[in-house]
Image (cartoon, helix red, strand yellow):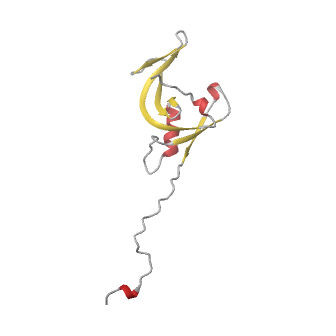
Amino acid sequence: MEKKFVKLGELVNDTFTVEKAWGFQWKCWDNDTKKMLMSDTYQQGYRKIYSVDTDKGKLDLGSGQLSSLLEAVYKDGKADINGRTFEVKSNGKSGMDIRYFFNPITVTKAKEEPEDDGLDDPIDMSMIPF
C-alpha cells in the first residue's frame, strides 16, 4: 500500500486530525534526483522534520509547526496532539513568507442520560411497612 502524502499548504482553510505522531528524521530535497533524502543523523543541509499520520495523509512538519500544534493543545502541563483535530489558516503569502496557524477543534460529545435508578421518584407513604 502506497503512503499518501499531504502538504500543509493543501490544508489551508480545512481541518485535519492527527492519528499518530512519529519521531523525527533529517530530510533534504535533492533537486537533481527529485527525491527527498533522509537520514537518522544530522547531515549538513538537512532539516529536522517530524512526521505525523493524519486523516488526510502523511504530513511532514518543521519544529516550529509542531511547536504550534503542541502549544495549541497545552493544558495543565501536558500537550498531546494524537487524536486531535486542527483547523489550518495561513497569512495568505507563499514560499518562504507563508506562515501557518493552527486552531484545535473541540469535539463536544452529547451528554449521556444517566440511568434512571428510581431515587427521584415520589414516595408512596402507604407502601412503607411501619
Q: Is residue 129 above or below residue 26?
A: below
What residue is drawn where x is 63% and y is 25%?
95
Asked whether residue 43 is in view, the answer is yes
Direction right: furthest residue: 92
Q: Is residue 87 above or below residue 42?
A: below
Q: Nearer the viewer, residue 125 or 1?
A: 125
Residue 38, given in percent of the width and then of the height, sits at: 44, 19
Q: Is residue 10 above or below residue 76?
A: above
In the image, taking residue 14 as reference, residue 74 lies left or right, namely left
Direction top: furthest residue: 32
Direction left: furthest residue: 130
Asked whether residue 61 is in view, the answer is no
Q: Nearer the viewer, residue 112 or 102?
A: 112
**Which quadrant would the N terminus be assigned to in this image?**
top left
Quadrant housing residue 86:
top right
What residue is drawn where x is 51% and y is 56%?
110
Residue 14, given in percent of the width and then of the height, sits at: 61, 37
Residue 88, given in percent of the width and then of the height, sits at: 59, 38
What residue is drawn where x is 48% and y is 41%?
70
